[in-house]
Amino acid sequence: MPERDEYFLGYRHAEQERLQRQAQELEQEARWLLDQIGLPAGARAVEIGCGPRGCLDLLIERVGSTGEVVGVERSDEAVQLARTFIVENHLANVRVLHTDARQTGLPRGEFDLAIARLVLVNIPHPEEVVSEMAALVRPGGVVALHEVDWIANACDPPLPAWDRLNNLMIAFATQNGNNLHIGS
């Protein structure tokens, strides 16, 4: 039996384009988070669920030419788009692996930072991904998560289409064991 798709928005090309726009829209928040972490030049970072772009460019800005950034992504198309993004933006020391975030196959205890953005809210059993992230960082390393909390999810003025979409998202999350309030 084929594996059930756990990602509500799917992996169509239109979703990959939306994720690229989302990376741009969340860039300032990501920069702020990375500033708080203080990732030094020469560090090694892994981004879980990097999608077609994620924070790969922001991470390599910080670790520089002596550091390394590894992206982890399970979507075939997202991996190919991320690799194209790396080439088009001349990002050195950045690579993207096509693998599952729960079992990346990466060496344990060798990264200074494991980061994920809007991954845990979209998956069942997020503790498996967090456990993998914790195993990837060295002692004293950082696990950073940028997540959403749907508690403030509202549309004003009210819009019936928004309510339908919201109800579908909640039903999907409930059926798949996703926690829409994981951010809190």
Image (cartoon, helix red, strand yellow):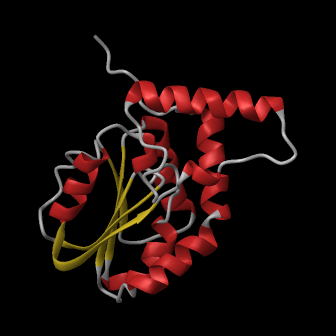
- Horizontal relation, residue 141 to residue 49: left or right: left
**Residue at 54% from the left image edge and 80% from the top image edge:** 32
Image coordinates for residue 142, horizontal then vertical, percent: 28, 75
Please state, as top left, top right, bottom left or bottom right, where the C terminus lies in the image: bottom left
Question: In the picture, residue 17 is in which quadrant?
Answer: top right
**Residue 95 showing in the rendered view:** yes
**Residue 64 showing in the rendered view:** no
Q: In this view, does 1 lie above or below 175?
A: above
User: Toward the viewer: 95 or 33?
Assistant: 33
**Residue at 64% from the left image edge and 54% from the top image edge:** 152
Please state, as top left, top right, bottom left or bottom right, where the N terminus lies in the image: top left
**Residue at 50% from the left image edge and 59% from the top image edge:** 54
Q: In this view, does 175 lie above or below 80?
A: above
- Horizontal relation, residue 99 to residue 23: left or right: left
Image coordinates for residue 77, horizontal then vertical, percent: 49, 37
- Horizontal relation, residue 22 to residue 119: left or right: right
**Residue at 61% from the left image edge and 34% from the top image edge:** 13
Q: In this view, does 7 lie above or below 68?
A: above
Image coordinates for residue 103, horizontal then vertical, percent: 19, 45
| Extreme-top residue of the structure | 1
Image coordinates for residue 51, horizontal then vertical, percent: 48, 49
* Total tally of numbered discs in the picture: 0
